Image (cartoon, helix red, strand yellow):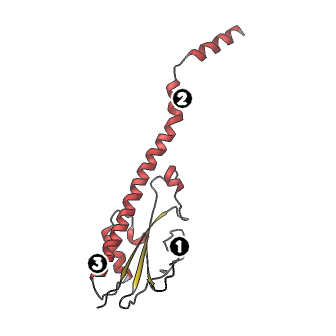
Amino acid sequence: MKRLNKLKRWLLRDERGSAAVEFVIVFPFFMGFLLSSFELTLITMRSTMLEHSLDRVVREIRLDTGAVPQHDDIKDRICDHAPIIPDCSKNLRLELIRVDPRNWVDPEPLFDCTDQSDTEVRPVRSFVSSLEDNDLMMLRACAKFDPIFPNAALGFSLSKDGAGMAALVATSAFVQEPS
């Protein structure tokens, strides 16, 4: 029994390895912070590029007086301006909605995105292909992406679809100028 007490006192006084205990406790938090920072940087860059490219395309539409924008043309132009969005032509979905400014009704709050886990192909929910002069149009774009670290910190907390992809949404509006 004396030997056991002596061993116990010796172990309690020995401070070797105390830094390893602190490391084991603190390391997961620092690693989560590092991974979340990297993930947030990529999300912010992609979101900014989507917003910027949508604004540029809407500006081009406004300046091209009288021309009716077509879905595939708009999608291609957005993807050309946003090279950081992965597989843009496959993961980008657009909605073009006519809005009445005199009798405002909020557009449906749920945006329309692609879902790689769906087996059936869904058509575009709303894309107005014929515009009249002075129509107020709202263009919404939804781009899907795979989180870099889907099971770590920020990547884990993102809302994802059945295929594990998260969504970025951008909205812009324009008035169809008379020709």
Label disc, if present, on residue 121 of the rendered structure: none
Q: Quadrant of residue 135?
A: bottom left
Mark 3 or mark 2: name the one nearer the start of the chain: 2
Q: Is residue 129 above or below residue 85?
A: below
Q: Amino acid at mark 1?
A: Leu
Residue pushed farthest front?
102
Disc 2 versus disc 1: distance between alpha carbons?
47 Å
The x and y percentages for residue 167 are 47, 65
What residue does disc 1 label? 110
What residue does disc 2 label? 21
Q: Nearer the viewer, residue 120 or 58?
A: 58
Q: Residue at x 40, y 82 (%)?
A: 137
Mark 2 or mark 1: name the one nearer the start of the chain: 2
Residue pushed farthest right?
1
Q: Amino acid at mark 3?
A: Glu
| Tag in front: 2 or 1 | 1
The x and y percentages for residue 10 are 60, 13
What residue does disc 3 label? 60
